[in-house]
Amino acid sequence: MEYHMEYSNDSSHKPEKELFMEKSFGGRKDKGKKRFLYVLSVAAICLVAGSAFYFTRTEKTNDDNNNDDMIINTLLKSPGGKKFIISKLTELVASYDKEGNLQEQKPSNELISFVDKNEKSEENFRKRFGNLKNGKKIVDINFADSRFLMTNLENVNSFYLFIKEHGKKYQTPDEMQQRYLSFVENLAKINAHNNKENVLYKKGTNQYSDMSFEEFRKTMLTLRFDLTRKIGNSPHVSNYDDVLKKYKPADAVVDNEKYDWREHNAVSEIKNQDLCGSCWAFGAVGAVESQYAIRKNQHILISEQELVDCSDKNFGCYGGLASSAFDDIIDLGYLCSESEYPYVGFKPRTCEIRKCKEKYTIKSYVSIPEDKYKEAIQFLGPLTLGLTVNDDFYYYQEGIFTSDCTEEPNHEVMIVGYGVEETFNSELNANEKHYYYIIKNSWGVSWGEKGFMRIETDELGLKKTNNMTDAYVPLLD
């Protein structure tokens, strides 16, 4: 079932079946080393020449393929790229004895070889790439294994397909090399997790996979808990028990197994905050959009950009709180539709609140008790709340997310429902029930399950994975 997930500006698509490098490296072991060296030399020349010819003959005139040419020229035709391939072939040759048999060697770690030999020290690497934590490969390379060369070539191929899928464009070769290093480290962590048994979720690449987590954290994780104030100080906060009596039928009971507002057509499409720390605005606006669908049967898209530009209680792309955003909506009087006040993220704009004809507002909002999340979701609607994003969360692709993270919340999301899934545990040789909340994120449809996440909880919804806290629901009347 599809749940409001078509978003033209961020639609993900399958990567083209186009290989950056060939997926195999043929050749039988020769009895004599001279013949072996000859075969390898010919193979090296063919590999470089063949790759250059393949990509040259497919050259196009559009912007995407101009970017492809830059990638190919930098990674394959540059001196660094050639040195990378030749150095790996040389290492492979050295791993054979005089009779052409493989010698057993100890695995080792080394810097990824886009850096010249005289630049491989930690000090010189930092000068070129900054304080990156991903300069070293995090998996061992066994030079006695004939597949060691393909390990790096497959990474380059994966990076190329990643660039194609997400339309990445880098300004300089140095920037592209830095992004490649981050991508390779992220990919290694993803593969290491996915190779484990009895894990409930899988990791994968997304539009941010060419950023180190530290860079991502500083740019995107900007929930401002330092702005937290006593909620009772706001004149716009309603009492939870009073609100619940209004919307919960007297004979109704909480269904602890499942409730999903997507199935009731009350969750708007997945949006993308891009490289702007405006999660607080997306969490607040998404909750308001759901209330219009539930209470008024109006399926609308409201402007996050207006909050980014006009909020005097938050900090635009540099962070904020959803509760302060609700106060802003009430104080401003209304928000415009997304079509009249479109999202541009970091692009400079001034507040233009008087420009719109379609106007949407709320009367108040309610703070949800920590032990009432499932009740509030079922009878009031989707919640907006804060949680902690760690690097596991960052890589999430599918399944029920589990984590022991206890750091302070740094990101605003929505909870649009909850459910339960039974899975088989091979260690216990038995099925297990796993309860989860359904999170709606603002990182586009390429992240998670088309923009959503299932995150672990318990039957009563009391377990708050990744420190979920400070939940609110906006009210239209």
Image (tube, rainbow, N blue to C red):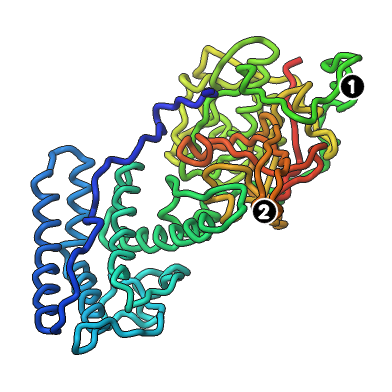
The label on residue 403 is 2
In the foreground, 230 or 11: 11
Considering every residue shown, the one lying at the far bottom of the view is 98
In the foreground, 317 or 249: 249
Residue contact between numbered discs 2 and 1, judged by CB atoms under 8 Å: no
Q: Label 2 amino acid? A: Ser
Q: Label 1 amino acid? A: Asp
Mark 2 or 1, closer to the camera: 2
Q: How far is the residue under mark 2 from the one under mark 1?
A: 35 Å
Query: Residue at (90%, 15%) from the top-left corner?
Result: 251
Q: Is residue 192 left or right of residue 176?
A: right
Q: Is residue 69 left or right of residue 118?
A: left
> Dot 1: few (<14), some (14–19), or many (≥20) neighbours within 10 Å?
few
In the foreground, 270 or 27: 27
In the foreground, 321 or 30: 30
Q: Work out whether mark 2 precedes mark 1 in sequence or the reverse, and give the earlier one.
A: 1
Indicate the quadrant where residue 246 lies: top right
Indicate the quadrant where residue 441 lies: top right
The label on residue 163 is none
Which quarter of the image is occupied by the C terminus? top right
Q: Is residue 147 left or right of residue 77?
A: right
Mark 1 — residue?
242
Q: Residue 105 appears at what percent x and percent y?
A: 36, 84
Q: Residue 360 appears at what percent x and percent y?
A: 62, 17
Query: Residue at (67%, 56%) from the top-left corner?
Result: 427
Q: Residue 288 appears at what percent x and percent y?
A: 65, 23
> Dot 2: few (<14), some (14–19), or many (≥20) neighbours within 10 Å?
few
